[in-house]
Image: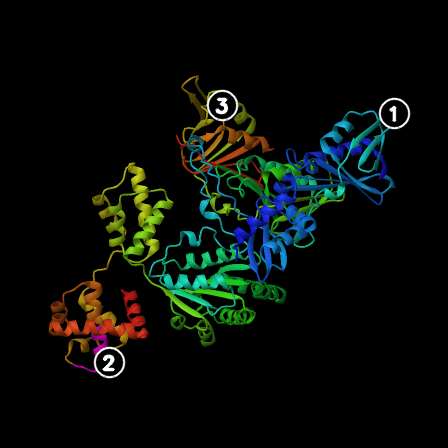
Amino acid sequence: MLNNAQLWEKTLFELERELSRANFSTWFKNTAILKQDEGTVLVGVPNEFVKDWLQNKFHKTILRSLRSLSENVRGLEYTVCKVEEPKKSAPIPEQSAMAQGSALPLENLYINKEDGLNPRYTFSNFIIGSFNELAYAASQAILKKVGTNVYNPLFIYGNTGLGKTHLIQAIGNEVKKHYPNKRVFYTTSEKFCVDYVNSLSQGSKAMANFKEKYRKYDLLIMDDIQFLSNKEKTQEELFHLFNELYHNNKQIIFSSDKHPNYIPTLEDRLKSRFSAGMIVDVQEPEYESRLSILRAKAELQKFFPPAEIIEYLASSVQGNIRELEGLLNGIICQSELKNRNLTLSEIKPFIKNTSKPKKLLSVKEIVKVVCDFYNIEEAFVYEKTRRKEVLKPRQIAMFLLREDFNISYPTIGQKLGGRDHTTVMHSCEKIKTDIRNDLSLMQEIDQIRAIF
Amino acid sequence: MNITCDRENLQKHIMSAERVTSKNSSLPILNSVLLITNNKNLIIRSTNLEVGVEFQIDADIKKEGKIAISGSLFSNILTNIPDEEKINISVINNICKISTKNKNITIKGLEADDFPTIPIINEGESFTIPSQNFIQNIKTVLMSAAVSDIKPEISSVFIYQKDKYLYFVSTDSFRLTEKKTEYKGEPFSQGIIIPIKNIIEIVKIFENINENILFKITKNQISLISKTVYVTTRVIQGVYPDYEQILPKDNTTEVVVLKQDLINTLKLSSLFSDKFNKINFIINPQEKKFLINTKNTDIGETETSIIATLTGDPVEIALNGKHLFDCLNVIKEDSVIIQLNGGAKPAVIKGLGDQSFIYLTMPLTK
């Protein structure tokens, strides 16, 4: 079967012979087939005038040409949309740009008020690595069949600054592009909550409007769902909204910084519904991904630092993409100030400054935090007891001391009641393997880490 | 078709309609205006596929019918028979006969059925505003819309409703104008982005009309309906930048100055400004100093001090003279306020006592 572009090209070729040149160039400029769906061809046209005219005057002619090329064409519909013209390379004269001074900072303010999406977030500037490929694959599956797929709802979770918002907004933008008829809406749980509270205070008509507003969408994206914890009534409203959308095969996408099961005071009925579709996590990017993210970001800013600098940044800054971006911006700013590329030695202190200052804690303090968390007497940890409720906190304390604070095995052993360094090694290994199988342990450790 | 109507009235509307015909289209029908009879009225329609317009004028209809004739030719004919009061138009087989008391003109018309239909909008949100109010507000913001169409959403005028106001905004990303006007009708949520070329046509159409305009809004097309005129235009499907975030909420320096003083000084100073229209301001409230100087290495330089009320921190800033003129031209008040936040942040200009108008312009690099 011919793809959309080929089919339209051949159709236009036929039409060109039938119509006068003037007619053809006036009415068929900037048109394209947007999609074919069960025999119905959707043609995108630049404006309502063209839409009316094609419908009234050329409908039969176009349909005939389409049928002769592709047998399964049954119907033909038109819609007004922006058909992308081949990009004209219009270089802005450099001089005038300079003369004008700097521009008003409008670039980052393109947020569509109607659907809440920021058009800057697209898949074309989304970097895929092993850390997010599952989430990406799920989003692609959604794009193929919005609503009626097994990935409904899609629940994406992961730490802050790992590109969750980018991904879900990109899905929204892409759906908007490919399915102009689908209504997309992006909101955060906080906005949803405010909206709900406002409509509550304005009486029953506003409440009905509120319900109506959210139920009409074909794709609802809700960001940062974790903020719904402790908001019972909003949760209840979301629950009803969810049911309504889900039963009508509307696509729903959520994001959160935690797995739904670990969002505190989230109602069970919501948890189970979130888990009904697909839950994917976005991990921290590994070295290669960080490298390509940095390269892409630098290119966007038209900044081309030496490769070694990018590599150094990627290797020395862990985790969070937002922080990576911040660092890169800092470096760009510095080198613009100095009007040359920075050297590696200039960058090193810069990174040191911006990386999070690690608090200096004594071993005793760390042990205290762990003990407080598990509610046991601190003294037990230092004793020779092997009771279960003591054993686990002790092992976790050792693990944290080693992993997060880089204290040597013998020192840890010595400080925690004069144990052998092999005991410590065993404890660390044990926690490491347990984490993989025991989600709740992982959660506990994360929570303890958050206290430091 | 056979009709009789008032020549002056017809001429006025044909000239208006002729403006919206396509000027250099390869399709001759688009250079035409379409005449259709409708009960007691004559309808004049024209379009350039961006904007479509329909005027309804009184006429004595003897026989119904329709014809498309060249807009420029028809309007030239009407201009050149200024003495005639009544004019008769009859059409047989697409030949159009124009006759007055002592003139007979025959012109070749085109098949009316080949004339494009213009979209009628029945759905969507709507609001009403008096035409003159609308025109005044649009004219206030027209000057700062971007000219090039690299970014279609900013070579436009943006209209939206918030709280009790209608807002009109334009920006070319170096300056921005916001004008608001009180609005008491039903709220509507969709902002409208009308391309600058189209809005200029619309301003011209409604310039001499004093009626209420009903706006009907859909995603990619809007229509403006008044008692005798129907206009429809494409609108930009896109996002207008959320410009409110860059409007400064505060300022560190404030200047209040007589508008005429400033205009006179700018006129003199711009004789010496460089090709970027750069005009330097030196403001020092402590020393009560408000200096404007320009310098051109090829010509010479000028420095003027103006009496003004100054408050806040001392600052030096370079602004684009053309941007200043554009803005001062639309300010009606006698005094203007210039608010600054240092030499690198945008300058805000308002009329003294006018809360409805804000003008923002970026400083030039020194």
Q: Give, as a three-letter code, the residue at label 1.
A: Asn
Residue bearing the label numbered 1: B102
Chain letter of the residue carrying label 1: B
Judge if badges 2 and 3 mark residues of a common chain. Answer: no
Classify mark 1: helix, strand or loop: loop
Please say whether residue B315 is one of the residues in the magenta stretch: no
Question: What residue lies at 56% left-to-right and 64% top-to-bottom?
Answer: A214
Badge 2 amino acid: Glu
Q: Residue A211 in the image: state x and y as whole percent.
A: 58, 66
Residue of label 2: A389
The relative height of residue A332 versus residue A276 in the rendered view (above or below) is: above
The image's colour scheme reads rainbow
**Which of the numbered marks, if any, corresponds to residue B270?**
3
On the question of residue B74 being in view, the answer is: yes
Residue A93: where, in percent of width, then height? 44, 32
Crowdedness near tag 2: few (<14), some (14–19) or many (≥20) residues, C-alpha within 10 Å: few
Locate residue A445: give its quadrant: bottom left
